[in-house]
Image (cartoon, rainbow, N blue to C red):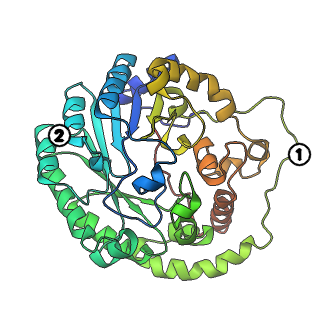
Protein backbone atom coordinates (compact mmCIF):
# COMPACT_ATOMS: atom_id res chain seq x y z
CA UNK A 1 0.00 0.00 0.00
CA UNK A 2 1.35 3.46 -0.94
CA UNK A 3 0.75 5.87 1.94
CA UNK A 4 0.99 9.47 0.75
CA UNK A 5 -1.13 12.59 0.80
CA UNK A 6 -1.40 13.48 -2.87
CA UNK A 7 -1.71 17.13 -3.84
CA UNK A 8 -3.72 17.50 -7.07
CA UNK A 9 -2.19 20.94 -7.61
CA UNK A 10 1.35 19.55 -7.53
CA UNK A 11 2.79 18.76 -10.96
CA UNK A 12 5.21 16.27 -9.40
CA UNK A 13 2.38 14.46 -7.60
CA UNK A 14 0.33 14.26 -10.77
CA UNK A 15 3.30 12.93 -12.73
CA UNK A 16 4.04 10.45 -9.96
CA UNK A 17 0.47 9.17 -9.86
CA UNK A 18 0.49 8.70 -13.63
CA UNK A 19 3.83 6.86 -13.47
CA UNK A 20 2.53 4.58 -10.70
CA UNK A 21 -0.65 3.79 -12.63
CA UNK A 22 1.31 2.99 -15.79
CA UNK A 23 4.24 1.35 -13.93
CA UNK A 24 6.74 3.54 -15.72
CA UNK A 25 9.97 5.03 -14.29
CA UNK A 26 9.82 8.71 -13.36
CA UNK A 27 12.77 8.92 -10.94
CA UNK A 28 16.20 7.35 -11.12
CA UNK A 29 19.32 7.46 -8.96
CA UNK A 30 22.81 7.06 -10.38
CA UNK A 31 25.16 5.89 -7.61
CA UNK A 32 28.29 6.97 -9.45
CA UNK A 33 31.02 5.84 -7.09
CA UNK A 34 32.00 4.29 -3.77
CA UNK A 35 34.81 6.86 -3.41
CA UNK A 36 34.49 9.75 -0.97
CA UNK A 37 36.44 12.70 0.42
CA UNK A 38 35.24 11.70 3.91
CA UNK A 39 35.83 8.43 5.72
CA UNK A 40 32.66 8.28 7.83
CA UNK A 41 32.78 5.49 10.36
CA UNK A 42 29.14 4.48 9.70
CA UNK A 43 29.11 4.64 5.88
CA UNK A 44 27.31 1.83 4.04
CA UNK A 45 29.16 2.21 0.71
CA UNK A 46 32.60 3.87 1.04
CA UNK A 47 35.54 1.60 0.16
CA UNK A 48 39.09 1.77 -1.11
CA UNK A 49 39.68 0.82 -4.74
CA UNK A 50 41.22 -2.44 -3.60
CA UNK A 51 38.22 -3.34 -1.42
CA UNK A 52 35.75 -2.42 -4.17
CA UNK A 53 37.50 -4.49 -6.83
CA UNK A 54 35.82 -7.62 -5.43
CA UNK A 55 32.40 -6.26 -6.28
CA UNK A 56 32.80 -4.80 -9.76
CA UNK A 57 34.14 -1.71 -11.47
CA UNK A 58 33.10 1.90 -11.94
CA UNK A 59 31.11 2.60 -15.10
CA UNK A 60 32.81 4.79 -17.69
CA UNK A 61 31.64 8.25 -18.73
CA UNK A 62 30.22 6.91 -21.99
CA UNK A 63 28.41 4.09 -20.20
CA UNK A 64 26.65 6.53 -17.88
CA UNK A 65 25.78 8.88 -20.76
CA UNK A 66 24.33 6.01 -22.77
CA UNK A 67 22.33 4.90 -19.72
CA UNK A 68 21.10 8.47 -19.25
CA UNK A 69 19.79 8.52 -22.81
CA UNK A 70 18.00 5.23 -22.18
CA UNK A 71 16.30 6.40 -18.98
CA UNK A 72 15.35 9.71 -20.63
CA UNK A 73 13.72 7.81 -23.49
CA UNK A 74 11.93 5.64 -20.90
CA UNK A 75 10.35 8.73 -19.32
CA UNK A 76 12.62 9.51 -16.35
CA UNK A 77 12.52 13.19 -15.39
CA UNK A 78 14.02 13.26 -11.88
CA UNK A 79 17.65 12.16 -11.67
CA UNK A 80 19.63 11.96 -8.43
CA UNK A 81 23.42 11.72 -8.45
CA UNK A 82 24.95 10.15 -5.36
CA UNK A 83 27.84 8.01 -4.17
CA UNK A 84 29.98 7.73 -2.01
CA UNK A 85 30.49 11.35 -2.85
CA UNK A 86 29.21 11.80 -6.40
CA UNK A 87 31.59 14.67 -7.17
CA UNK A 88 34.50 12.23 -6.64
CA UNK A 89 33.51 10.29 -9.74
CA UNK A 90 36.54 10.72 -12.07
CA UNK A 91 34.60 12.33 -14.94
CA UNK A 92 31.99 14.10 -12.81
CA UNK A 93 32.26 17.51 -14.46
CA UNK A 94 31.86 16.20 -18.02
CA UNK A 95 29.08 13.83 -16.97
CA UNK A 96 27.17 16.44 -15.00
CA UNK A 97 27.38 19.03 -17.76
CA UNK A 98 26.03 16.63 -20.37
CA UNK A 99 23.31 15.26 -18.08
CA UNK A 100 22.20 18.84 -17.36
CA UNK A 101 21.69 19.42 -21.06
CA UNK A 102 19.49 16.32 -21.44
CA UNK A 103 16.57 17.92 -19.61
CA UNK A 104 16.69 16.04 -16.29
CA UNK A 105 15.79 17.75 -13.02
CA UNK A 106 18.97 16.82 -11.16
CA UNK A 107 19.40 16.44 -7.41
CA UNK A 108 22.96 16.39 -6.11
CA UNK A 109 23.12 14.16 -3.02
CA UNK A 110 26.36 15.13 -1.37
CA UNK A 111 28.32 15.80 1.81
CA UNK A 112 29.36 19.17 0.26
CA UNK A 113 32.73 18.81 1.96
CA UNK A 114 35.18 19.01 -0.91
CA UNK A 115 34.22 20.94 -4.05
CA UNK A 116 36.97 22.17 -6.31
CA UNK A 117 36.53 25.50 -8.06
CA UNK A 118 35.93 23.60 -11.31
CA UNK A 119 32.99 21.75 -9.71
CA UNK A 120 31.59 25.00 -8.35
CA UNK A 121 31.90 26.49 -11.81
CA UNK A 122 29.87 23.73 -13.46
CA UNK A 123 27.19 24.16 -10.77
CA UNK A 124 27.10 27.88 -11.54
CA UNK A 125 26.68 27.24 -15.25
CA UNK A 126 24.16 24.41 -14.77
CA UNK A 127 22.52 24.82 -11.34
CA UNK A 128 21.03 21.56 -10.03
CA UNK A 129 17.32 21.30 -9.30
CA UNK A 130 18.14 20.60 -5.65
CA UNK A 131 21.14 19.94 -3.39
CA UNK A 132 20.50 17.30 -0.72
CA UNK A 133 23.30 17.68 1.81
CA UNK A 134 24.12 15.55 4.84
CA UNK A 135 25.51 17.10 8.01
CA UNK A 136 27.66 15.06 10.40
CA UNK A 137 27.93 17.47 13.31
CA UNK A 138 28.08 21.10 14.32
CA UNK A 139 31.83 21.64 14.62
CA UNK A 140 35.15 20.77 13.01
CA UNK A 141 36.05 18.70 16.07
CA UNK A 142 33.01 16.48 15.62
CA UNK A 143 33.56 16.21 11.87
CA UNK A 144 37.06 14.92 12.57
CA UNK A 145 35.65 12.25 14.93
CA UNK A 146 32.99 11.14 12.47
CA UNK A 147 34.44 11.76 9.01
CA UNK A 148 38.18 12.01 9.62
CA UNK A 149 38.31 15.55 8.15
CA UNK A 150 39.44 18.16 10.67
CA UNK A 151 38.03 21.06 8.63
CA UNK A 152 35.03 19.23 7.19
CA UNK A 153 32.44 21.33 8.99
CA UNK A 154 33.77 24.64 7.69
CA UNK A 155 34.00 23.33 4.13
CA UNK A 156 30.49 21.90 4.24
CA UNK A 157 28.93 25.11 5.56
CA UNK A 158 30.82 27.13 2.96
CA UNK A 159 29.44 24.96 0.17
CA UNK A 160 25.89 25.15 1.57
CA UNK A 161 26.23 28.92 1.42
CA UNK A 162 27.58 28.58 -2.11
CA UNK A 163 24.47 26.68 -3.26
CA UNK A 164 22.22 29.26 -1.63
CA UNK A 165 24.18 32.07 -3.31
CA UNK A 166 23.36 30.63 -6.75
CA UNK A 167 19.71 30.08 -5.71
CA UNK A 168 19.81 26.29 -5.62
CA UNK A 169 17.22 24.88 -3.16
CA UNK A 170 19.00 23.04 -0.36
CA UNK A 171 17.63 20.23 1.82
CA UNK A 172 19.62 19.19 4.88
CA UNK A 173 19.75 16.03 6.96
CA UNK A 174 21.70 15.37 10.14
CA UNK A 175 22.94 11.79 10.44
CA UNK A 176 23.21 11.08 14.16
CA UNK A 177 25.44 8.43 15.73
CA UNK A 178 26.87 8.09 19.23
CA UNK A 179 29.93 10.20 18.33
CA UNK A 180 27.96 13.29 17.21
CA UNK A 181 24.66 13.05 19.12
CA UNK A 182 25.56 15.88 21.49
CA UNK A 183 25.98 18.21 18.48
CA UNK A 184 22.22 18.08 17.87
CA UNK A 185 21.69 21.59 19.37
CA UNK A 186 24.60 22.99 17.34
CA UNK A 187 23.14 21.58 14.13
CA UNK A 188 19.83 23.21 15.03
CA UNK A 189 21.57 26.56 15.61
CA UNK A 190 23.40 26.27 12.30
CA UNK A 191 20.21 25.53 10.39
CA UNK A 192 18.45 28.46 12.05
CA UNK A 193 21.34 30.69 11.01
CA UNK A 194 21.07 29.36 7.45
CA UNK A 195 17.26 29.72 7.54
CA UNK A 196 17.00 26.00 6.72
CA UNK A 197 14.93 23.19 8.17
CA UNK A 198 16.58 19.79 8.52
CA UNK A 199 15.64 16.14 8.89
CA UNK A 200 17.14 14.04 11.67
CA UNK A 201 18.36 10.60 10.55
CA UNK A 202 19.06 7.98 13.23
CA UNK A 203 18.47 4.87 11.12
CA UNK A 204 21.97 3.53 10.44
CA UNK A 205 22.74 0.24 8.70
CA UNK A 206 25.73 -2.00 8.11
CA UNK A 207 28.00 -1.70 5.08
CA UNK A 208 26.27 -3.02 1.97
CA UNK A 209 28.96 -5.56 1.08
CA UNK A 210 30.76 -6.42 4.32
CA UNK A 211 29.86 -5.28 7.84
CA UNK A 212 33.57 -5.24 8.75
CA UNK A 213 34.12 -2.36 6.30
CA UNK A 214 32.46 0.15 8.64
CA UNK A 215 31.71 0.75 12.33
CA UNK A 216 28.02 1.32 11.64
CA UNK A 217 26.59 -1.30 13.97
CA UNK A 218 28.77 -0.27 16.92
CA UNK A 219 28.36 3.50 16.57
CA UNK A 220 24.63 3.75 15.78
CA UNK A 221 22.23 4.71 18.54
CA UNK A 222 20.48 1.90 20.37
CA UNK A 223 16.71 1.60 19.83
CA UNK A 224 16.19 3.16 23.28
CA UNK A 225 18.52 6.08 22.50
CA UNK A 226 16.71 6.67 19.22
CA UNK A 227 13.35 6.66 20.97
CA UNK A 228 14.45 9.06 23.71
CA UNK A 229 16.03 11.43 21.21
CA UNK A 230 12.73 11.43 19.28
CA UNK A 231 10.90 12.31 22.50
CA UNK A 232 12.85 15.43 23.45
CA UNK A 233 13.81 18.71 21.70
CA UNK A 234 17.33 19.01 20.33
CA UNK A 235 18.46 21.14 23.28
CA UNK A 236 17.81 18.17 25.62
CA UNK A 237 19.68 15.50 23.68
CA UNK A 238 22.08 14.82 26.58
CA UNK A 239 19.12 14.17 28.88
CA UNK A 240 17.59 11.90 26.25
CA UNK A 241 20.73 9.79 25.92
CA UNK A 242 20.89 9.38 29.70
CA UNK A 243 17.18 8.47 29.94
CA UNK A 244 17.70 5.69 27.41
CA UNK A 245 19.39 3.56 30.06
CA UNK A 246 16.10 3.22 31.92
CA UNK A 247 13.99 2.79 28.80
CA UNK A 248 16.33 0.02 27.62
CA UNK A 249 15.04 -2.15 30.47
CA UNK A 250 11.66 -2.44 28.72
CA UNK A 251 13.33 -4.62 26.08
CA UNK A 252 14.29 -7.34 28.55
CA UNK A 253 11.12 -9.34 27.85
CA UNK A 254 10.39 -8.00 24.37
CA UNK A 255 9.13 -10.33 21.69
CA UNK A 256 6.86 -9.76 18.73
CA UNK A 257 3.21 -10.29 19.54
CA UNK A 258 1.46 -11.85 16.56
CA UNK A 259 -2.22 -12.10 15.75
CA UNK A 260 -3.39 -15.69 15.38
CA UNK A 261 -5.31 -15.07 12.16
CA UNK A 262 -2.93 -15.40 9.20
CA UNK A 263 -5.44 -13.97 6.73
CA UNK A 264 -6.35 -15.27 3.32
CA UNK A 265 -4.54 -12.83 1.06
CA UNK A 266 -0.86 -12.17 0.46
CA UNK A 267 -0.08 -8.68 1.72
CA UNK A 268 2.20 -6.43 -0.34
CA UNK A 269 4.02 -3.30 0.78
CA UNK A 270 4.37 -1.56 -2.56
CA UNK A 271 5.90 1.88 -2.25
CA UNK A 272 6.32 4.72 -4.74
CA UNK A 273 9.74 3.36 -5.65
CA UNK A 274 8.39 -0.10 -6.40
CA UNK A 275 6.23 1.35 -9.16
CA UNK A 276 8.04 4.37 -10.58
CA UNK A 277 11.64 4.58 -9.37
CA UNK A 278 14.96 2.82 -9.77
CA UNK A 279 18.56 3.09 -8.66
CA UNK A 280 21.66 1.99 -10.54
CA UNK A 281 24.83 1.22 -8.59
CA UNK A 282 28.41 2.12 -9.45
CA UNK A 283 29.04 -1.52 -10.45
CA UNK A 284 26.05 -1.68 -12.79
CA UNK A 285 23.46 -3.42 -10.62
CA UNK A 286 19.91 -2.04 -10.58
CA UNK A 287 16.98 -2.19 -8.21
CA UNK A 288 14.05 -0.06 -7.12
CA UNK A 289 15.94 2.01 -4.55
CA UNK A 290 19.34 2.57 -2.97
CA UNK A 291 18.38 0.38 -0.01
CA UNK A 292 17.86 -2.62 -2.30
CA UNK A 293 21.03 -2.28 -4.38
CA UNK A 294 22.73 -5.13 -2.53
CA UNK A 295 19.87 -7.44 -3.50
CA UNK A 296 20.27 -9.47 -6.66
CA UNK A 297 18.94 -7.48 -9.59
CA UNK A 298 19.36 -6.93 -13.33
CA UNK A 299 22.30 -5.20 -14.98
CA UNK A 300 20.95 -2.54 -17.35
CA UNK A 301 24.39 -2.00 -18.86
CA UNK A 302 24.28 -5.58 -20.12
CA UNK A 303 20.61 -6.06 -21.08
CA UNK A 304 19.47 -2.47 -21.60
CA UNK A 305 17.39 -0.27 -19.33
CA UNK A 306 13.94 -1.28 -20.61
CA UNK A 307 14.67 -4.98 -20.16
CA UNK A 308 16.04 -4.30 -16.68
CA UNK A 309 12.94 -2.27 -15.77
CA UNK A 310 10.67 -5.08 -16.91
CA UNK A 311 12.69 -7.48 -14.75
CA UNK A 312 12.16 -5.26 -11.70
CA UNK A 313 8.42 -5.28 -12.34
CA UNK A 314 8.46 -9.09 -12.51
CA UNK A 315 10.43 -9.25 -9.24
CA UNK A 316 7.99 -7.03 -7.33
CA UNK A 317 5.76 -9.76 -5.98
CA UNK A 318 8.68 -11.51 -4.30
CA UNK A 319 10.62 -8.42 -3.18
CA UNK A 320 7.70 -6.45 -1.76
CA UNK A 321 5.73 -9.30 -0.20
CA UNK A 322 5.09 -8.56 3.49
CA UNK A 323 6.63 -11.27 5.72
CA UNK A 324 4.15 -13.29 7.74
CA UNK A 325 5.60 -11.93 11.00
CA UNK A 326 5.05 -8.35 9.83
CA UNK A 327 1.59 -9.04 8.48
CA UNK A 328 0.43 -10.56 11.78
CA UNK A 329 2.35 -8.21 14.09
CA UNK A 330 0.21 -6.29 16.55
CA UNK A 331 2.41 -3.21 16.01
CA UNK A 332 1.76 -3.26 12.26
CA UNK A 333 -0.14 0.05 12.20
CA UNK A 334 2.66 1.79 14.12
CA UNK A 335 5.58 0.23 12.27
CA UNK A 336 8.22 2.71 11.17
CA UNK A 337 9.76 2.03 7.77
CA UNK A 338 10.18 -1.71 8.12
CA UNK A 339 9.75 -1.75 4.34
CA UNK A 340 11.40 -4.16 1.89
CA UNK A 341 14.47 -1.95 1.57
CA UNK A 342 14.85 -1.47 5.30
CA UNK A 343 14.38 -5.18 5.95
CA UNK A 344 17.08 -5.99 3.41
CA UNK A 345 19.50 -3.43 4.85
CA UNK A 346 18.97 -4.79 8.36
CA UNK A 347 18.87 -8.53 7.75
CA UNK A 348 20.17 -9.21 4.23
CA UNK A 349 16.71 -10.45 3.26
CA UNK A 350 13.35 -8.88 2.42
CA UNK A 351 11.57 -11.88 3.94
CA UNK A 352 11.96 -11.15 7.64
CA UNK A 353 11.69 -8.05 9.85
CA UNK A 354 14.70 -6.28 11.28
CA UNK A 355 14.58 -6.64 15.07
CA UNK A 356 16.36 -3.29 15.48
CA UNK A 357 13.39 -1.55 13.88
CA UNK A 358 10.92 -3.73 15.81
CA UNK A 359 12.49 -2.79 19.14
CA UNK A 360 12.52 0.91 18.21
CA UNK A 361 8.83 0.79 17.24
CA UNK A 362 7.97 -1.10 20.44
CA UNK A 363 9.66 1.56 22.60
CA UNK A 364 8.04 4.45 20.73
CA UNK A 365 4.66 2.78 21.13
CA UNK A 366 5.34 2.39 24.85
CA UNK A 367 6.20 6.08 25.17
CA UNK A 368 3.09 7.03 23.22
CA UNK A 369 0.87 4.83 25.40
CA UNK A 370 2.29 6.58 28.47
CA UNK A 371 1.48 9.97 26.98
CA UNK A 372 5.10 11.04 26.60
CA UNK A 373 4.91 11.05 22.81
CA UNK A 374 2.01 12.46 20.80
CA UNK A 375 3.07 11.13 17.41
CA UNK A 376 5.82 9.00 15.93
CA UNK A 377 8.75 10.81 14.28
CA UNK A 378 8.56 11.15 10.52
CA UNK A 379 10.81 9.09 8.27
CA UNK A 380 12.34 10.59 5.12
CA UNK A 381 9.98 10.33 2.18
CA UNK A 382 11.03 7.77 -0.42
CA UNK A 383 10.33 8.58 -4.05
Residue bearing the label numbered 2:
127
Q: Mark 1 and mark 2: span between their CA atoms?
A: 55 Å
Whether residue 338 is visible to the viewer of this picture, yes or no, is no
Q: Nearer the viewer, residue 312 or 9?
A: 312
Label 2: how many Cα within 10 Å (few below 14, some 14–19, many 20+)? many
Q: Is residue 366 left or right of residue 178?
A: right
Residue bearing the label numbered 1:
260
The secondary structure type at the circle numbered 1 is loop
At 57% from the left and 26% from the top, the residue drawn is 312
At 53% from the left and 59% from the top, the residue drawn is 203
Whether residue 272 is visible to the viewer of this picture, yes or no, is yes
Residue 77 at what x, y percent from top left? 33, 26
At 70% from the left and 50% from the top, the residue drawn is 353
Q: Splitting the image into 4 quarters, where does residue 186 fall?
A: bottom left
Closer to the chain start, of discs 1 and 2, is: 2
Q: Nearer the viewer, residue 255 or 311?
A: 311
Amino acid sequence: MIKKQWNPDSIKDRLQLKAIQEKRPLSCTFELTYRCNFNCRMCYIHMTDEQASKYGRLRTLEEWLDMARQIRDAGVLYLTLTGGECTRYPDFIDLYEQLSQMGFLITIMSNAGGYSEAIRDVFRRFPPHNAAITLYGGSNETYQKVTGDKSGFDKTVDNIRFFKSIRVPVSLTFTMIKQNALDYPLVGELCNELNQSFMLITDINAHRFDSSLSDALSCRLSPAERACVALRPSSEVAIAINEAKELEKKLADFKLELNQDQGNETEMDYCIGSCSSCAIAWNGKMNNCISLLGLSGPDPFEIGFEAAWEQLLKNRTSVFKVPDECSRCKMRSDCLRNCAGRRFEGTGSTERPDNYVCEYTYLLKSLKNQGFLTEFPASPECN
